[in-house]
Image (cartoon, helix red, strand yellow):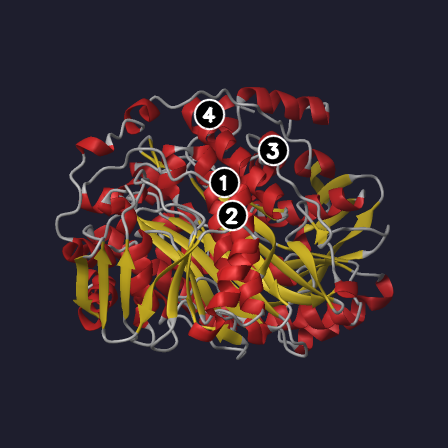
Amino acid sequence: MRPEDWRSMGLKDEEYQMIIEILGREPNYVELGMFSVMWSEHCSYKNSKDVLRTFPTKGDRVLQGPGENAGIVDIGDGLAVCFKIESHNHPSAIEPYQGAATGVGGIIRDIFTMGARPIASLNSLRFGTLDDAHVRYIFDGVVSGIAGYGNSIGVPTVAGEVYFDSSYQGNPLVNAMCVGLLEVEKIKLGRATGKGNPVILVGARTGRDGMHGVTFASEELSEASEEKSPEVQVGDPFTEKLLLEACLELINNDDIVGIQDLGGAGLTCATSEMASRGGSGMEIELDLVPCREEGMTPYEIMISESQERMLLVVTPEKEKKVHDTFKRWGLISTTIGHVTDDGILRIRQDGKVVAEVPARSLAEDSPVYCPAYQEPAYLKTTAALDLQSLPDVQDANQVLLKLLASPNIASKEWVWQQYDYMVRTSTVVLPGADAAIIRIRGTKKGIALSTDCNARYVYLDPYTGGKIAVAEAARNVVCSGGEPLAITNCLNFGNPEKPEIFWQFRQAVCGMSEACSAFNTPVTGGNVSFYNETNGEAIYPTPVVGMVGLLEDVQQHCTPAFKAAGDVVVLLGDTYDELGGSEYLANIHQKVQGQPPALDLEKEKALHKVVLAAIKQGLVKSAHDLSEGGLAVALAECCFTNEIGAAISLSTQGLRLDSLLFGETQSRVLVSVAPDKLSLFLELAAQNLVPAYKIGQTGGTNLQVTVDGAAQIKLPLSQLKKAWQEAIPCAMK
């Protein structure tokens, strides 16, 4: 074997030597390919595994944590929620429609392979600036791909987030999340057990699409990346729908021993991981694998990432029934091998052994690296933000209009109106609210779902930014009436072999871990996506959090919109002179500087307690967290849905005007309260030591804000809403 062979597959020289030591000989070309995909960063987490161990992963409700296809939490009544988020960044940069579509398809398979019926999809998307024609092409293609797959398979896309920044110009982020529902006793795991049990491959035929997709995901993008486009998989949601229904039928009838989807690294991944988890081995006959192209080699069959395929282990007495079930659903299923007890993954073709590798060596025994890390030099520059030298707001009306028209704050209706968010008719709250709410049929329960991350904060202070990502996701769930249960995450960073990037990663994970522990929201799984760089320039560090919360009574949900004129507007939480990392600072002053807002986790927890209690007791009519754009933007957003204005009176109390109106101080929520409930609500806040300020009243058709008696904002809702609604559609014309 030549050095260029393993290097071209992404293996290091020392890794090749490890393979020789494991096998006691040199690998052949098929085996080398199998090791290269399974030891890629995307599959093995070799640079991140050690750091990820710091996440809290256990809790009273956790039924399945990291290590399986998806995490599962108990929601009572014999039911559980299964959920996970993963990235499909590099494929989407090359071929946006199929890259995004197959990202959705892959995460849906992760859910139903656990025995759960997918009930909702979410996403977290990042793109470059919309003044670039290529960015608009990528943005349009990704949204179309998500819609095309999700709408066709019948899983509602109910929530998400979209941000735009030049750091993502050449490397968009497409993170797809899926949530499923299952009965606790019907959880299925991706394990191969039982010597002699048949191994069945079902679904689409195997082709040459997606070759070395995981290797592609484990390297930086460059000018040459366009040549990688054949590696982007092609999805077929209609086949996946049949696969979903057939597999769930078999799982419900207890006809399956183990099941795993074929995603990254294809057949190599599914066979080695199932065998390794089960403490077993497998023998596979490649002559039996249905291929859609002539002359496919063992190497190609083993690493193909063709979509819509599943691998099952069944008992001999259930084998015929399983095949008959798949045939009834119009699917191709083939017994391609059997389980062994020697721990070896043995691959045959034409009667000859073409690969013979310990299953565990592929799935578990990749090298684990502890890369060097150091604080980035840029922080010395970005930390220097002198508020005294920054001119304060002169025309708050114009600032508010400009912020509402910023693509990061503007309405994302152009995006979500392309999604079928009502299919299955369990969607209680439409996209655009703080969190999605899904009804659990047959019960009073509901679940609240949110994805969040302010990458600008993480760039300026990864530790604090990581904490805030968890806190804001939890706050969004709480404002919707849900009790936060657990998170999944998708950690998008640059090249981990660069010490400054790995420092960002370590710090962000540390901050996230602290927040998860504080909120008792363990991490049930997720994805690490490294090498998000274009020509050596990294994206902003973007650790996306997917949060799941529980409503014991779905009727007690809450939304951000003001509900009636004459209600009292109350601001929970104190405001400070904090502008670092804000949308205001970036949009109005073109500065990405300073420290992100401070986060006191105890104050945040107290806020959550008050808001949840107030919603359950019917004390508030609306609740909306304060995030990008601060108080003024949050007020406008609360006015839009029902077109109910507000008259607000504030005091600077020594604050800058821009901090008061547009600062992004954490642990704040805006609520509206009926006058007859106000005293009870204020008493609840006081009992929990949460500051509560009566700042105005709802009504009229304008948003009016006075500060220390002087009018600062007075604009008709029609003008504000026009700026907010039309920004993205106009940019896409």
Q: In this view, does 79 lie to the left or right of 105?
A: right
Asked which secondary structure carries label 4, the reply is loop
Does the residue at mark 1 contact the one at mark 2 (Cβ under 8 Å)? yes
Amino acid type assigned to the residue bearing label 4 in the image? Glu
Q: Nearer the viewer, mark 2 or mark 4?
A: 2
Residue underneath mark 4: 497
Question: Visible in this render: residue 650?
Answer: yes
Q: Please name the amino acid that badge 1 sits on.
A: Asp
Q: Amino acid type of disc 2? A: Glu
Question: Residue 604, labelled with which disc?
Answer: 2
Query: Residue at coordinates 28% horizontally, 25% vertically from top-left?
Result: 381
Where does residue 77 sit, x and y in percent of width and height?
A: 75, 69
User: Which mark's residue is nearer the viewer, 4 or 1?
Assistant: 1
Give me the C-alpha separation between circle 4 and circle 1: 32 Å
Answer above or below: position of 167 versus 417.
above
Q: Mark 1 points at which residue?
A: 600
Secondary structure found at label 2: helix
Quadrant of the frame with the N terminus: top right
Q: Which of 41 and 454 is in front in this view?
A: 454
Relative to residue 613, is residue 218 depicted above or below? above
Residue underneath mark 3: 49
Secondary structure type for disc 1: loop
Quadrant location of the C terminus in the rendered image: bottom left
- Alpha carbons under labels 2 and 4: distance apart: 35 Å
Q: How crowded is mark 3: few (under 14 residues within 10 Å), some or many (20 or more)?
A: some
Residue 313: image quadrant is bottom right
